[in-house]
Amino acid sequence: MSEHRRKPPQPQGGGRAAARRGQTGSSSGRRAAPRSATGSPSDSYDSGGEERPFGSRAEARRAAQRSSTSGGRRRAADGAGHGGHGGGRRGGPGGPNGPGRGRGREPDPYKKRIIDYPRAGKYGWARWVPSWKLVTGTFIGFCGSLMAVAGIAYAMVGVPDVAAAAKAQNNVYYWANNKPMVSTGGETNRQNIKYEQIPKAMRYAVMSAENKKFETDKGIDPVGIGRALFNMAKGGETQGGSTITQQYVKNAMLNDQSQTVSRKFKELLVSIKVGRTEPKEEVMAGYLNTAYYGRTSYGLQAAARSYFGKDATDLKANECAFLAAVLKGATYYDPAGQTAIDPGATREANTKRATDRTNWILDEMVKDGHLSASERAGYKDLPKLQNPRSSSELGGQIGYLVDLAKGYVINNTDITEEQLRQGGYEIHTTFDKKKVADLEKAVKKVRAENLDEKRRPKTDKHVQFGGASVDPKNGAIVAIYGGESATKHFTNNADETGAAVGSTFKPFVLAAAMQDGKRDPDLGESQAQDERTKVSPDSFYSGKNKLKIKTYDGSIWKNDKGKEWLQTNDDDESYGAPPNYRIDLREAMRVSANSAFVQLGMDVGLDKVKQAAENAGLRESSLTGTTFPSFSIGISDPSAIRMAGSYATFATSGKQNEPFSVKDVEYEGGSVWKHKSATKEAFTEQVADNVTDVLKTVVEDGTGTSAQLDGREVAGKTGTTDGNKSAWFVGYTPQLSTAVSMYRMDDDETKKSRPFLEMYGTGGQETIHGASFPAEVWHDYMEQALKGEPSEDFPEAEPIGEVVNDLPTPSVTPSPTESEEEQPEPSTEPSETETTPSPSASETCGPFGTFECEDTGGTETGGTETGGTDGGVTSSPTESEDPGNTRGNGNGGIFG
């Protein structure tokens, strides 16, 4: 073979590949020299210089261009790049033994990693700072993953089935003995209708109120979703979608009503699918057929029948606007009131909310071009509504019991109204089936024997009874009487407030006098608050009719017009021997003398009387006129349940238990809530037992003798109010405390104003008082309710307090205004310049006010009590506290 064709010998460095590696070991410092390098140029080629480490001069030139400036073009061309000259950061000038030996073998930077993190070629903190490429790639990957998951989820979700949405479970309510009472709560009151049967006015009312862009949107509202996500992110309450489509989807997903992010995400996906695949007509019909309108009505057809007694196709524009308003929340927009669920959802408050929103919707319909201005002008008030009706299985007292228990669950557990509507709960109540029947039977007996609406329509119509019975040991409500029937009379007379309690309030005044004591008139106001004298029931006060009432320091109490308060007694009768009419508090309670307890309340302080009433178990919201003298004789209007519970506090020697109607709640066989008693000490044993001892006198030989039980000790009090508009008897034994009320009020619950009516002549009697029909009902019920139970006696009362006013004092001096009637003793009353500040006219005047503001010769009488034999109330709540003169102060519901 020719010498010229012989293959040149391969360089020791490993050929062209090694030469290329050598290039990286130049003075640029990007890579260490190969282990075989010696660091000398002669080691790269032979002594003759004929053999080159590169394949051609072109490669040498390219190597020279890639080398650093320290190596130079000539060294690169000659192959000096094998080891470099040690100028690099990682490589040495030659082989492993050269003076510029590197830090060791490093990863090849040309071998790329998919994720360069921590970053190669970086040191310290810089290695852990991600590059913009990594950040961008990660974000794109995350978004892509979400889209993939959303796409899969979107493909898997199905469109709601309106028919399936009607399938909900019932709730089962149990008696106290765990036997079933009734099953109710499932969505049985529903009838779907077609889109063509829905009035245009109803569709437009809903769109104007909730989703103006419904006809053009894609089923979701991005702004609303963003708002909901932001609210959830900051820990607020989770929110649903605002479009009609989203609300329809929410109503139809009955199998999961939890307020979680995952459920909201699913709801969103379904809404998007429905918005893309379902016609708007089907969505609108589905929404109106699945929505809840209150009164156990699901769907437009059921709502039209419940509220207006007509088919949905016959609804007028203002009726449609009202139903659209109710969709915002029936609890707060049903004019009938929903105090069983929320005490703030009163008839008056709900009527105002419903009126305002209905008018607003009608105005929006005009703005949106869905209603003419001329037609709108014809709708000024709410459309006429029919009385609420329950199903037949909720007739009699059952409906009242269910409402009471349902409201208690919603207000005292984590179970929401919406969850309860979906059903599946087992609710174990405290109601005793026999006692409920006994109480209803006692009321029906009194009605049948005494009331005759046909013979005496002007006096015997519209008579209402209410009653409640509480176990003193724990506060369990064992029986109530809410009215004739829950399907005829919607308001629960046992729970709603309204009728003033009259003289049954006096025990709280006596309790305050024994617990806190009266103030010393000789001390300054500040010192008098601290240095008090606890009052004995044997203390003396004046029982004089038209007694001039004074503040604790002896100054005359006057109204804002400077007129004096003269407190009247029942039938304008004075009690006690003239001329001072001294009477001890026990006797004053027995005969129900108003004047003595009004003055006692002023001496103790009305703030202390109020606190005693609250300690016993009354709610502050039911206490009326707390700054007026008549507060002490019962112008307030607590419910029958609260009155029974507060008297039970005396039965337990001062231990107060909150009334309750539900023992425990179960769901799918497991307990989800259980009642826990929390007994509080309201009064000392001495105070409570002395109150009981005094109230025993009332039943043994006072106004409450008709409530006596065979072989049992009974303590109780009668009560009658101004104008003979309500009458009460509240009494107890050691085992049971019961309150019974009676009053007259128009049965038409759709009327905005339903004033209390006088009961003169009712039942053929001249007047109705607590000792008559209420005490008779109480007696008949308690005889049966306690039948078979052993007789128990009350604890012996230990003496308490000091006997005050044992001698005649200014507080019992006859008024100079009555000098023509009796011969007065020398008066030591202060001059008119010493009067205390008077209430404002707005608090004292008015047709139903605490004072009658006509001029009466310089004095004011505390009412004109004609309530029979038990004293009664001399004044009613002010007009400002009782708008419209309806059911009391408007505070009702859940044991108001």
Image (cartoon, rainbow, N blue to C red):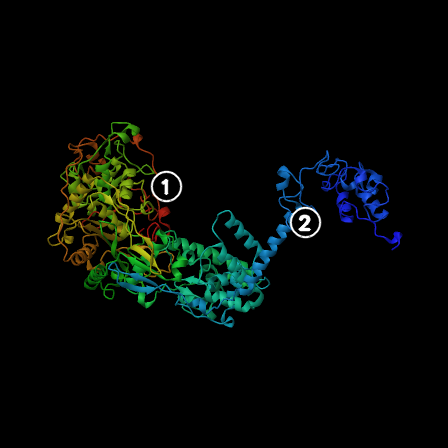
User: x and y percent of residue 160 in the render?
Assistant: 49, 66
Quadrant, the N terminus = bottom right
Q: Which residue is mark 2?
A: 112
Q: Residue at x 51, y 70 (%)?
A: 195
Crowd tier of the residue under label 2, counting other residues whose Cα lies within 10 Å: few below 14, some 14–19, many 20 or above: few
Q: Is residue 845 above or below residue 87?
A: below
Question: Foreground mark, 2 or 1?
Answer: 2
User: x and y percent of residue 217 in the render?
Assistant: 59, 61
Q: Is residue 373 visible?
A: no
Q: Is residue 453 above or below residue 224?
A: below
User: x and y percent of residue 285 in the render?
Assistant: 50, 68
As drawn, the residue found furthest toward the front would be: 1
* Residue in front for this viewpoint, 331 or 414: 414
Determine the secondary structure under disc 2: loop
Give left or right: position of 25 versus 690.
right
Mark 2 → mark 1, Cα distance in angstroms:
91 Å
Q: Which residue is mark 1?
A: 841
Q: Is residue 295 above or below residue 13?
A: below
* Residue in front for this viewpoint, 120 or 346: 120
Determine the secondary structure under disc 1: helix
Q: Amino acid at mark 2?
A: Lys
Name which quarter of the figure residue 710 lies in: bottom left
Earlier-in-chain disc, 2 versus 1: 2
Q: Is residue 206 visible?
A: yes
Name which quarter of the figure residue 81 lies in: top right
User: x and y percent of residue 867 in the render?
Assistant: 22, 50
Q: Amino acid at mark 1?
A: Ala
